[in-house]
Image (spheres, helix red, strand yellow):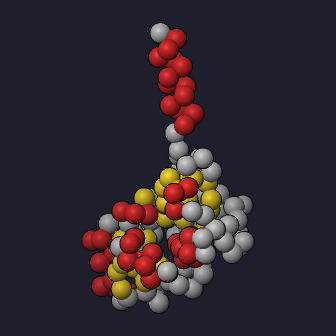
Amino acid sequence: MNIIILSLIVLLACSKEITPIEYGKDQCEHCRMTLTDKKYGAEIITKKDKAIKFDAAECMLNYIKEKKIEENDVDKYYVINLTEPGVLIDAMNAAYLISPELRSPMGENISSFADKNTAEKYLNDHGGVIFSWDELKNKFK
């Protein structure tokens, strides 16, 4: 019984969880701006369970590009779902729309969506180009 309890404690202590962005309080690790727009934001969770927050996907991508973190130190990447302000989703499974009509905080105009169908609806209304995570990362290399 003690072994089971100890095992559960160890598993819970090692779990890596999303740390919600505190808009108006948290600061972007890349550009140092205060995070204010709930439609945008991003977060890296490291393998050491540290949350690194960004005001936009482009700040996170530039942070990665500038090698301020090694890829093998990252556990997960998250981005805010434009259709659910303040809600972080898995960046690797998200669809991205770059549209000048959807202005992001840092001017790259990258909006994140939980799925490609939703991104396509916004594309029809606002124009632009849809990217996957890998395509977007390659654009920032």
Front residue of 48 and 60:
48
Count of residue discs: 0
Q: Give the quarter of the image for residue 42.
A: bottom right
Question: Residue at 36% of width from left, 89% of height from top?
Answer: 127
In this orientation, does residue 84 appear?
no
Question: Residue at 53% of width from left, 84% of height from top?
Answer: 108
Q: Give the quarter of the image for residue 116.
A: bottom left
Front residue of 126 and 95:
95
Front residue of 116 and 11:
11
Residue found at the very far left of the displayed protein: 117
Q: Is residue 99 above or below residue 17?
A: below
In percent of width and height, residue 7 lies at: 50, 23
In percent of width and height, residue 17 lies at: 53, 46
In this orientation, does residue 11 appear?
yes
Q: Is residue 67 above or below residue 90?
A: below
Q: Is residue 23 above or below residue 125?
A: above
In percent of width and height, residue 38 lies at: 56, 66
Question: Residue at 50% of width from left, 14% of height from top?
Answer: 3
Left or right, 28 with respect to 80, comes to right
Question: Residue at 38% of width from left, 72% of height from top?
Answer: 134
